[in-house]
Image (tube, helix red, strand yellow):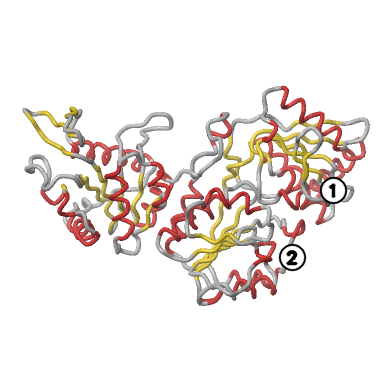
Amino acid sequence: MILVPDLADIESRSTSEAERRVARLLRSVEAPADAVAFFSLGLRSHGTKQQGEADFVVLWRNVVILVEVKGGGVRKHEGRWYSIDRRGDWKKLTESPMAQAQSAMYALRNILNEEGVGWYASEAVVITPDIDAPPPAIDWKESHWWARERMSVAALAEGFEKVAADARTAPYGVKVARTRQLRERLYGEFSRMPVIDAQRGAVIEEQNRATEGQARVLASLARNPRMLMFGGAGTGKSLVLTEGAKQEAGSGRSVLITFHSPSLVAFFRPRIEGRNIDLIPFSELSGDQRYDVVFVDEAQDLMNAHGMDRLDSVIKGGRAGGRWRMFLDPNNQARVDGDFDPDVFELVQEEALQCDLDMNVRNTRAIVHVVQEYLGADIGDPGIVHGDRVEWHWSSGEADAEAAEAVAVELVSGGVRRQDVWMIDVRREAEPELTKAGFLMTNPRFAKGLEAEHVIVFGLPEDYDDRGVAAFYVAITRARVTLHVIASKKDKKRLQNLLRERGAR
């Protein structure tokens, strides 16, 4: 069964050995095609408060089953429920484990009702893996409390089948939720996109939850063998790719993540650490090994005959019959560092289901508006409300690295960490390096696909042809919190001309 998040994440997050044991069994269950098990620490009742807790939420044959896992002993004494730890110490519970599971079931039902999902069957189950037999059934069905005797892959599968088969049927005349819709909503509720330093700043907080589009794509990845995912800069393509790869590896498939830019190795490596996932830049693929699933990031860079032939050699079953996911930016970043062939792209489109990521989860609203205004590029709806306005620094002299570094120093003096600041020279060709003051200076080619909290852009294009526009686009879409643009008088005139050209189209 698919686990969300994958088993490695659950093993690291959960403090309960009983929960980890159940997760390991769930992963090995041979489940129906649409079955998914979600692990969570809480269910929200609205944006800021949590109500009810769920250890696992299992979607099984269109029935949503809330699972409460209680390790150690569980007893009812003189009308009150107690848990018993390994030392034999008793701890009073506020309610029975079954009542806890049922409260989580009702909390989730309220959430999905508010989102207009429709009626769906739901059940509550308790698993107590450390006791020999469930307590006598009082306010629940015997089939809904599982003890040590049911701690096997086959017994869990049998238990879910029994619970789902006995679930209520829909009342006459009500709108019934479809399985696909339930899956997507549950992915949205329980998927959290991992973000480094997610606790610092309001902007970072807003970027730390799966959008509806990301949830839709994650749900689709599990069901479809070949997929093309479109999204502008900042829509979360690489993070969704990472979560999808972890799910595939967790299901026992051999997985490859590949890409054109070697700089993406540093982005992906910490996010897949400990998983059986190969991370290989495209230029280093030998073709000696074929994979069950291949994920391609920034696929527009490889959308040509040579690139697709090379991919064909590493996918079991080939590109036409194998399992692959390509993530690409329709705004043609390939002009920065890659080769995009529209004829090849048309052929590949016919081989796969296509999905869009349409919510920008990197850039603030102000940055999204600048990209749309100057370049007309679609990088999704601005999902991040908070954030400073874009700072334009109009220089009477040279808009060069010295001017950019002065802005970087000012940011650090205001409390920003030095390592969170990037200086992007749009016209630069050299590899990234540290300035004397310790700031990273890079260019669009090496920054593509990556992000930084604070970005200072300088060295604007002298010609806004296709290559110049693409480089400018990459540079100004790297920022997550603040964007600073250093521009000379000549730059200002060229930008004004670019705006007039945009307005005339």
- Which of 48 and 276 lies nearest the eye of the viewer? 276
Q: Residue furthest front?
A: 87
- Name the residue that disc number 2 marks: 339
Can you give x and y, in whole percent of width and height, for residue 352 in the image? Answer: 54, 68
Q: Secondary structure at mark 2?
A: loop
Can you give x and y, in whole percent of width and height, for residue 246 in the image? Answer: 47, 55
In the image: residue 42, left or right of residue 208: left
Q: Residue at x 66, y 57 (%)?
A: 330
In the image: residue 13, left or right of residue 194: left
**Where, by quadrant of the figure, is residue 439 drawn?**
top right
- Which of 460 and 114 lies nearest the eye of the viewer? 460
- What kind of residue is marked 1? Arg
Can you give x and y, in whole percent of width and height, for residue 347 in the image? Answer: 62, 74
- Name the residue that disc number 1 marks: 427
Residue 390, above or below 305: above
- What kind of residue is marked 2? Asp
Which of the two discs, 2 and 1, labels the residue nearer the N terminus?
Answer: 2
Q: Secondary structure at mark 1?
A: loop
In the image: residue 51, left or right of residue 362: left
Q: Residue at x 72, y 69 (%)?
A: 341
**Where, by quadrant of the figure, is residue 55 drawn?**
top left
**Where, by quadrant of the figure, is residue 109 drawn?**
top left
